[in-house]
């Protein structure tokens, strides 16, 4: 990819409700959104914390806010724009009708992780809070890549959310250039996509998905096949959490 031509970017994405939430009668807590219509290509995936009451709403609000505010943000100042956009999302939660407290403590009921990407004319950056992952492949055959890996707390089941008071301390940026393909995913797919220590990707999972999505011209057929792949019995047993996968050919 020489320069990111927004008009030619091909995006396929799906969110699958995991059996852990389906069994409780809960909807998918994940959310994703992207835009090819501004000066920048923007994609964001968020995993609403299932242990909180409104995690799904928190995921939707942060994705929508980031995409809306970053699509035309100056790329040279994109880090500050990301921080500002997350702050705006937090303010929305502060005064959300479901936050009766209308204070910072109340927004933890909307806890969600964030993993996103902004691309502009061959340059790109990942921004990341908590688990989930993002990969920028910098070779057409996917032999080279830059990854933004999950980050957990002291315990393996503990992660970070943009609703925490110290969210800026956990916000990570990873830059990349001349990417051909992007993949963003929620935590429900990281154990499929990486080795257990996250030192390398799992090509037997990611490469077949990439090859199919790259070759299938019909968006509806591609998304349906991707959803079916992530929703097999084997996939559900390996990880019962919700699963979101966003693929973009730049």
Image (cartoon, helix red, strand yellow):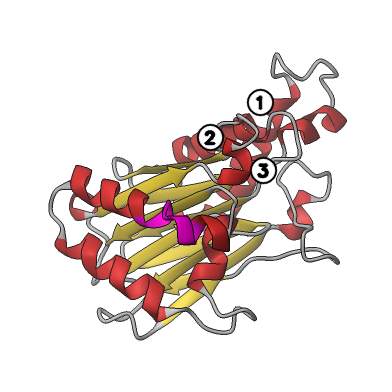
- Judged from the image, the secondary structure of the residue bearing numbered disc 2 is helix
41 shown above or below 37: below
**Residue 56: where, in percent of width, then height?**
61, 33
Measuring from the top left, give residue 233's x and y in whole percent.
46, 55
Q: Residue 87 in the image: x percent, y percent? A: 68, 38
Residue 63 vs residue 119, the one in the foreground: 63
Q: Are marks 1 and 2 in contact (CB under 8 Å)?
A: yes
For disc 3, the marked residue is 112
Pointer 1: what residue? 92
Give the residue displayed 76% in from the left and 40% down from the top: 51
Q: Is residue 232 magenta?
A: yes
The verdict on residue 69 being magenta is: no
Q: Determine whether, in the image, residue 51 is placed left or right of residue 123.
A: right
Task: Give the distance between the C-alpha atoms of the residues marked 3 and 2, in whole angstroms.
Answer: 14 Å
The residue segment tinted magenta is: 229-235
Tell me the CA gap for discs 1 and 2.
9 Å
């Amino acid at each position: 990819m020489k320069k990111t031509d927004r008009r030619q970017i091909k995006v396929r994405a799906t969110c699958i409700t995991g059996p852990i939430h389906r069994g409780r009668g809960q909807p998918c807590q994940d959310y994703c959104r992207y835009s090819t219509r501004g000066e920048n290509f923007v994609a964001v995936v968020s995993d609403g914390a299932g242990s909180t009451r409104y995690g799904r709403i928190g995921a939707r609000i942060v994705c929508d806010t980031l995409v809306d505010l970053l699509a035309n943000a100056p790329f040279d100042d994109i880090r500050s724009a990301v921080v500002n956009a997350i702050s705006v999302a937090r303010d929305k939660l502060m005064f959300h009708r479901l936050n009766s407290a209308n204070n910072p403590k109340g927004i933890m009921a909307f806890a969600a992780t964030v993993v996103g990407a902004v691309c502009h004319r061959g340059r790109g950056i990942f921004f990341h809070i908590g688990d989930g992952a993002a990969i920028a492949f910098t070779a057409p055959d996917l032999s080279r890549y830059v990854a933004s890996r999950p980050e957990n707390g002291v315990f393996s089941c503990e992660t970070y959310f943009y609703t925490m008071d110290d969210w800026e301390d956990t916000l990570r940026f990873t830059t990349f250039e001349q990417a051909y393909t992007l993949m963003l995913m929620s935590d429900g797919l990281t154990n499929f996509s990486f080795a257990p220590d996250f030192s390398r990707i799992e090509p037997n999972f990611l490469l077949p998905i990439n090859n199919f999505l790259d070759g299938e011209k019909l968006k509806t057929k591609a998304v349906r096949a991707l959803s079916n792949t992530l929703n097999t019995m084997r996939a559900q047993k390996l990880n019962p959490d919700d699963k979101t996968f966003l693929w973009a050919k730049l």
